[in-house]
Amino acid sequence: MLTKEENDLLTRVEGDAPMGRLMRRHWTPVCLVEEVAEPDGTPVLVEALGQRMVAFRDSDGRLGLLDERCPHRGASLLLGRNEECGLRCLYHGWKYAVDGKCVAMASEPESGALMDKVRARAWPVVEWGGFVWAWLGERDDAPPFDPPAFAPRDDIDIAILKIRVPCNWAQIHEGQIDSAHSSSLHSSDMVPARVTRASADDKSWYRPSTDKSPRMQIERTRYGFHYVAIRRPVKNAATHNYLRVTEYVAPYYSLIPPNDRHRVASVIVPVDDVNSVFYFIAWGGPDVPTTEEWREFHRTRRGIDLTDDWAPRGTLDNRFLQDRAAMKAGSFTGIEGIPNQDVAMWVSPGPIVDRTKDFLGASDLAVVEFRRMMVEAARAVARGEPAIGTAEPRIPQASISSLEGIYPKEEDWRTLSAAGSPARQAAA
């Protein structure tokens, strides 16, 4: 359990909240590149950390991210004309370049004296790994962009689905780092099988264990923490363990243990205190699906399974489109699509979970660590200390990796796969 003050520190990101300040000291993935792919295309509303912004690509293909409100009289630039290398406000024809500089004032004299003084607020952006990343802190404080572990190269094969979720960011992260829930919630899609490691096909994902009660061990790192879920394997249970190691890279993403076709990651970005955007990613393997295949497999196609605004069609009011007949026929949840099953669990407790009342078990070790670590990190920022993951020496994100597999019981999970790499260095 947390106190109310601790729960507020963990969950609140708007305004001057310490957690929001922490997040603004990291490059933030604010939308998908596909949403702003067209030069002179429709401006896109971008919401993150309580801030409303407008993303657009100008006539020359340059990307801009501006405050939604025109600095003249506050009209929404989302309605503006994207033309001739600038975004023009409909109200009086004031026009802004991607850097925020005012380049035209239809309603003012042509002397230009006022135009030289006016700027729309603009944020630095980087396009990488299918995302638009923005520096939402003070412009002069922006460090060089550090590629994330799930896109160590910009040309890597990657598939991304997106869902706008009506709940706080922290309860989504708690679901993503919770290895135990998959054996129940996703049991119809993640099927125990006599395989040598986690595998996948076009119908299901398979795991070499029937064990629903994993034992957990955890270790902090400079960038967050990693932990192992230890299960009995289907074969050689007397001498071997089935290990699944998850990496949490604060504050935005987790590396989920891979399968034999591709690696998996999840990214969660707060829209505000009570809404978030969830991205689920396949990348870096011998058979990475296309984005279309990935979304179809998970029942998260925009305009079909989701609304045009990326919102789930399943809600608490319609019981997340749960099919009780399918449950009687063998589906554990009656909800199609692994992310949709997760969304139901994230949303059903309410917009912000009251952590002063919940009871945690041994399988919640990673959840306990997440809460403790991030509350401590928020307090550190409030004291004026560096944000988690930003102090030197920093661990290059590209060196971090999750893992899974069947190993002899005497193996130490902390040294597996990336033995000797910086990703396995514990926090100082």
Image (tube, rainbow, N blue to C red):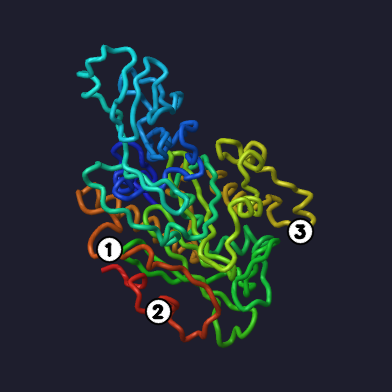
Whether residue 154 appears in this view of the structure is: yes
User: Amino acid type of disc 1?
Assistant: Arg
Which is closer to the viewer, label 3 or label 1? 1
**Residue that mark 3 sits on:** 330
How far is disc 2 from disc 3 in space, using C-alphas? 40 Å
Please tell me which residue is depicted at 47% across the width and 43% down the height of the picture. 276
Quarter of the N terminus within the rendering: bottom left
Task: Classify 146 as above or below 244.
Answer: above
Of residues 77 and 216, the one nearer the viewer is 77
Question: Considering only vertical position in the picture, is 180 above or below 127?
Answer: below
Q: Can you tell which quarter of the image residue 76 is in? A: top left
Task: Classify mark 3: helix, strand or loop.
Answer: loop
**Which mark, by number, is residue 394?**
1
Q: Secondary structure at mark 1?
A: loop
* Residue named by callout 2: 415
Q: Residues within 10 Å of mark 1 (few under 14, many from 20)?
A: few
Which circle, 2 or 3, is nearer the viewer? 2
- Examine the image and state in which quarter residue 152 appears: bottom left
Residue at horizontal 60%, vertical 59%?
Answer: 289
